[in-house]
Image (cartoon, rainbow, N blue to C red):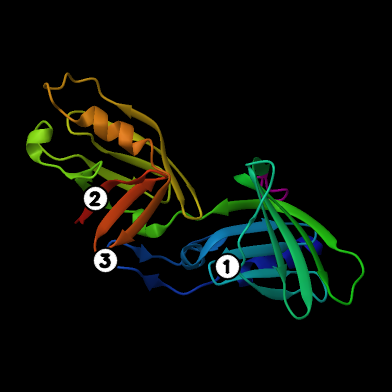
Amino acid sequence: MKNILSILLLLSLTIGCKSTAGKNHEVSGTTSEYGTQEDQMKYYLTATGNEPFWALKMGNENTEFTSLIPGKEKLVFQASEPIKAMDANVKMYKLSNETSSATISIQQLECQNSMSGAISPYKVSIEIKNNSELEFKKLTGCGNYNTDYRLHDIWVLEELNGFKVFITDFQKELPRIEINSAENKFMGYGGCNAISGNIFYEKDLLRFSQVISTRMACAPGNKEGEFTKALQSITTYSIGDNRLTLSNPSGKILVFKKVD
């Protein structure tokens, strides 16, 4: 009976409307254990757990906790910044409102859903209580960061290490990357060879990793090596005016222009 109630609540939480975000970003009504695609654009992290069933959605404006726990069916907290833990792979959030308090810990550790068997890259632990209660309720589950859907596009290089680039800096055309935000992968052209790899995404954090390329010999002076090295140094990004700007602690490194 408990499993049936869990499934019914999960279905009620994940039914959503269709929306669009530009012609290249149609959002369907498909759902996952982490909610609708619309939810995944609004919230940077979603998580679920079982026995009792609970769901967590963390966004830039608020954090929403829903569950089958009496008195904790739906709790909404204002967003807060994470507390830096000694372990770099753990982020902790302290939340409170007029009626409740919660501590949320997000650990980069492979996690398996106890009902569906699905594997997620993060373990999520929650301690939560109403202010009238003496003890916290402890819950564990699995979570996932939702990659910024705006990255999902084709981008052509405009600037490299602070300088505008030209076709003469490369082989026949400018470098480009095509990002698949749903699969956290990218592919493209480095200025001489085809390139591909993975992206690692957390809130406001973006890294390009496991970059591989074909082995075509490049002409002297080709800046492909400088481009791929810069790409692998990226840690943050911003999007605006049809531009994708990639940076690291040293400053702005790469600027791309969106192309259709």
Horizontally, residue 252 falls left or right of residue 10, namely left
Q: As drawn, which residue projects farthest toward the front?
A: 250
> Does dot 1 land on a helix, a strand or a loop?
helix
Q: Which residues are magenta?
A: 112-117
Horizontally, residue 16 falls left or right of residue 21, namely right
How many numbered marks, from 0 up? 3
Mark 2 vs mark 1, CA separation in Å: 35 Å
Q: Which residue is mark 1?
A: 14
> Does dot 3 land on a helix, a strand or a loop?
loop
| Residue 257 visible in the picture | yes
Q: Closer to us: mark 2 or mark 1?
A: 2
Residue 130 place in picture, x, y as percent: 83, 74
> Does dot 2 land on a helix, a strand or a loop?
strand
Q: Which residue is mark 2?
A: 256
Residue 226 place in picture, x, y as percent: 25, 31
Q: Which residue is mark 3?
A: 23
As drawn, 259 above or below 169: below
Q: Confirm or deny contact between disc 2 and disc 1 (CB under 8 A).
A: no
Q: Amino acid at mark 2?
A: Phe
Instruction: Name the quadrant containing residue 48.
Output: bottom right
As drawn, 12 above or below 179: below
Residue 182 place in picture, x, y as percent: 42, 51
Circle 3: is it few (<14), some (14-19), or many (20+) Cα within 10 Å?
few
Of residues 59 and 67, the one drawn nearer to the viewer in this rendering:
59
* Residue at the spot 24% in from the left edge and 64% down from the top edge: 241
**Residue 40, numbered circle:** none
Q: Closer to us: mark 1 or mark 3?
A: 3
Q: Earlier in the sequence, mark 1 or mark 3?
A: 1
Q: Amino acid at mark 3?
A: Lys
